[in-house]
Amino acid sequence: MSFKEFKFHPKITAGIDACGFTTPTPIQKEAIPPILEGRDILGLAQTGTGKTAAFVLPLLQRLLDGPRKRVRALIVAPTRELAEQIHDDISKMAKQTGLRSISIYGGVGKHPQVKAIRNGVEIIVACPGRLLDLLNDRAFSLNAVEALVLDEADHMFDKGFLPDIRRIIKQLPTKRQSLVFSATMPREIRHLAENILTNPVTVQINHTQPVLSISHVLFQVAKARKTSLLKSIIQEKEMSSTLIFTRTKHKAKSLALHLQKEGYSAASIQGNLSQQKRQQALNGFKDGTFKILVATDIAARGIDVQGISHVINYDVPDTAEAYTHRTGRTGRAACTGEALIFAGREDDKMISIIERTLGKKMRRETAPGFDYDPREDLIEEKRERAPRQMPRRKKPAVTGRRRSQHSSGSGVFSLASSGRNSRSRSQSAQQ
């Protein structure tokens, strides 16, 4: 099957050709026809399967006809990176159509965003917080929206955005087309979909099955030796582009700095960075300036970087779904990839859950010189649990006038003398 069978407008076909699309992915093949018919959609598919084009292309077809310079389509995404990625994809696919989009999110100034919207855009790609902020300011209206898209809906639930989503939906016209896309379907998201979708078509593309193009490797290693193991693996394996995930923002920053000092072209992306610095790191990773990107789970979704050869889980994620999204950054667009995970004794339960999701055991490997001894982790755990002793404070040295007072008699005498002198000075001042 080719994209020609969808009978897109020639201006949209030009965008498809510019993006290098030839054969629709399964989610595109199943979702595009009902979206073109105006049906509501509940789309379930793994990350990296072409979901963005599955809803953008038919939306562009719909928006070609009708008024311009008013907001007619709203796409809501959970992270700045995903919003920016969708906006970039729209810009490529819509280049010949004259349709314009804008991405709006926090961490940058409001006024340029408001100005761009008032100058006239047809598509807004937004993060919930900033969108509500601008709507509360009455910066613009959503009264003309014809289509709503919720992308990565499960991640919006994870980040606590569902109340914001409900507030946004109240400001939309009741008569509209609604599309909900998600990689997983927790109960809360299913309830939301039931409330906002009308007689939807469900498109489900093996959303719970592992991506076959990714191999999974487990290294058992003590916490204290993870960084040494990481450097050993990077040196040994041919890694053209490596994405490393840590659990905390502090660790992402410190690990990237450590790798930089060791001579690696590395950068970090985490929530404490400004949007400008996050974008600089991501752009550098995309264009090859940085071969290594160390990130928290904000990069587990929404970054579409071609050719990531390896994903390394420096820290085991909290859920199997997070592991699926992390590792989904590699093995994309018919390429193969390798996912590595560093685990210790305390991670056994989560490893079992992840392997049940994968439907198979991860391949166990041991790097030379890094045989795992669980006692190392036990020692580290005892050290972390041990109460920290506060350093004893040194008594201040007695010098000058205080020394003479101490030497002249008892402390009571000195304090009394001091009090009399103070009263004498006070009385003198009053006189």
Image (spheres, grey):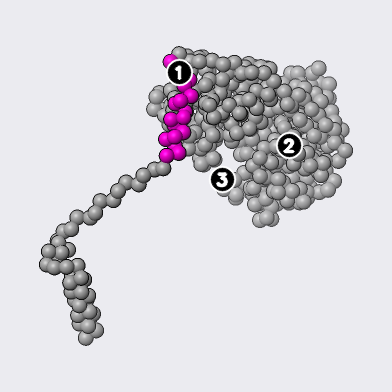
Q: Main secondary structure of the magenta part?
A: helix
> CA gap, disc 1 to disc 2?
39 Å
Mark 2 or mark 3, whichever is nearer to me: 2
Please tell me which residue is depicted at 48% across the width and 24% down the height of the picture. 374
Residue 1, visible in the rendered structure: yes
Q: Is residue 382 magenta?
A: yes
Position of residue 177 measured from the top left corner of the image (x, y, whole percent): 82, 40
Looking at the rendering, the stretch of residues picked out in magenta corresponds to 369-386
Residue drawn at (69%, 33%) of the image:
90
Residue type highlighted by circle 2: Pro
The foreground one among 105 and 87 is 105
Q: Which residue is mark 2?
A: 186
Magenta stretch: includes residue 68: no
Is residue 91 visible in the rendered image? The answer is: no
Marks 2 and 3, Cα distance to the nearest angstrom?
32 Å
Type of the residue with mark 3 = Val
Calculate the distance from the C-alpha at mark 1 to the C-alpha at mark 3: 44 Å
Q: Percent from the top left, x then y, of residue 264? A: 44, 23
- Residue that badge 3 annotates: 108
Residue named by callout 1: 370
In the displayed structure, would residue 155 be above or below residue 290?
Answer: below
Earlier sequence position, callout 2 versus callout 3? 3
Which residue of the protein is positioned furthest toward the bottom in this rendering? Answer: 431
